[in-house]
Amino acid sequence: MKNLIITWGLALTTSFSAFAATTATLNLKGNVPNVMSIDLVAESVALLLPLQTTQTNTRVAVVTEISNSNTGYKITAVSTNLGTLKHANGNLFSYNLFYAGTNLNLQNASPTPIVNSSTNAVNRTRDVTISYTGVPADQLTAGDYTDSVTFTIAAN
C-alpha cells in the first residue's frame, strides 16, 4: 500500500510538471489623458493704447500654450470687430495683431489657424503684439475704441 501511494504521488507530480509553463507574460498599459489649455496675460498697455502714436510690434499680451496632443495643435484668434477698434458711434481704427510674429489677419471672419505639428508635450509662452499707424487726436472722436480677441487652442 505504501508503494502504491508513493508511485501514485510520483505519477501525479510528474504529470503536473509536464504541463507547467516555462514562461509567463505580464501585459502592462498606462494612459495619459489629453491636456490642452491656453492662458493669456494682458499687458497694461492693452487697455491704454495711445491711438495718436504709431505702434510697431508693441507687446499687448503673453499667451501660454499647453498641449500634450499626439497630433499637434492649432491656435485660432477671432476679433469681435474684425481687426478694428470700434468707437460707440461706429468709427473704426484699424490695427494688426501678431501672434509669435505671425500676422493674425483678424479681418477674416473665418480665421486661419496657427498650426503646431509637434507631437511632443508643449508648454511655452508666445508674445502677442500690435501695430498701427497713429492718428492725431484732433482727427479722432473722443472716447474709447475697443475690440475683443478670443484665442482658442484645439488638437489637430
Image: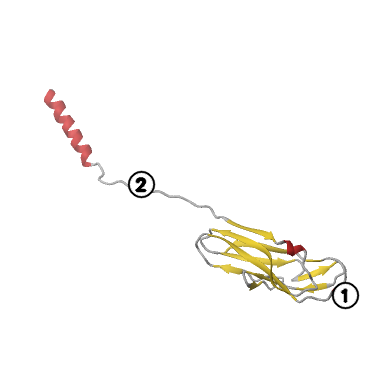
Closer to the camera, 109 or 35?
A: 35
Q: Secondary structure at mark 1?
A: helix
Q: Is residue 132 above or below residue 73?
A: below
Q: Which residue is mark 1?
A: 138
Where does residue 20 sit, x and y in percent of width and height?
25, 41
Where does residue 155 sit, x and y in percent of width and height?
57, 62
Left or right: residue 151 compared with residue 73? right
Q: Are marks 1 and 2 in contact (CB under 8 Å)?
A: no
Q: Sequence-wise, which precedes: disc 1 or disc 2?
A: 2
Task: Tell me the distance, in whole angstroms, between the alpha carbons under discs 1 and 2.
Answer: 78 Å
Q: Comparing marks 1 and 2, which lies closer to the viewer?
A: 1
Category of crowding for the residue at label 1, using alpha-carbon neighbours closer than 10 angstroms: few (below 14), some (14–19), many (at least 20): few
> In the rendered structure, which amino acid carries the disc numbered 2?
Leu
Closer to the camera, 56 or 150?
A: 56
Q: In percent of the image, x 38 and y 48: which residue is there? A: 27
Q: In percent of the image, x 85 and y 70: which residue is there? A: 90
Closer to the camera, 77 or 1?
A: 77
Q: Which residue is mark 2?
A: 26
> In the rendered structure, which amino acid carries the disc numbered 1?
Asp
Closer to the camera, 2 or 71?
A: 71
Where does residue 70 sit, x and y in percent of width and height?
51, 61
Image quarter of the N terminus = top left
Where does residue 146 sit, x and y in percent of width and height?
79, 66
Q: Secondary structure at mark 2?
A: loop
Category of crowding for the residue at label 2, using alpha-carbon neighbours closer than 10 angstroms: few (below 14), some (14–19), many (at least 20): few
Q: In percent of the image, x 81 and y 76: which residue is there? A: 135
- Residue at the extreme top of the image, as rendered: 1
Q: In percent of the image, x 14 and y 28: which residue is there? A: 6
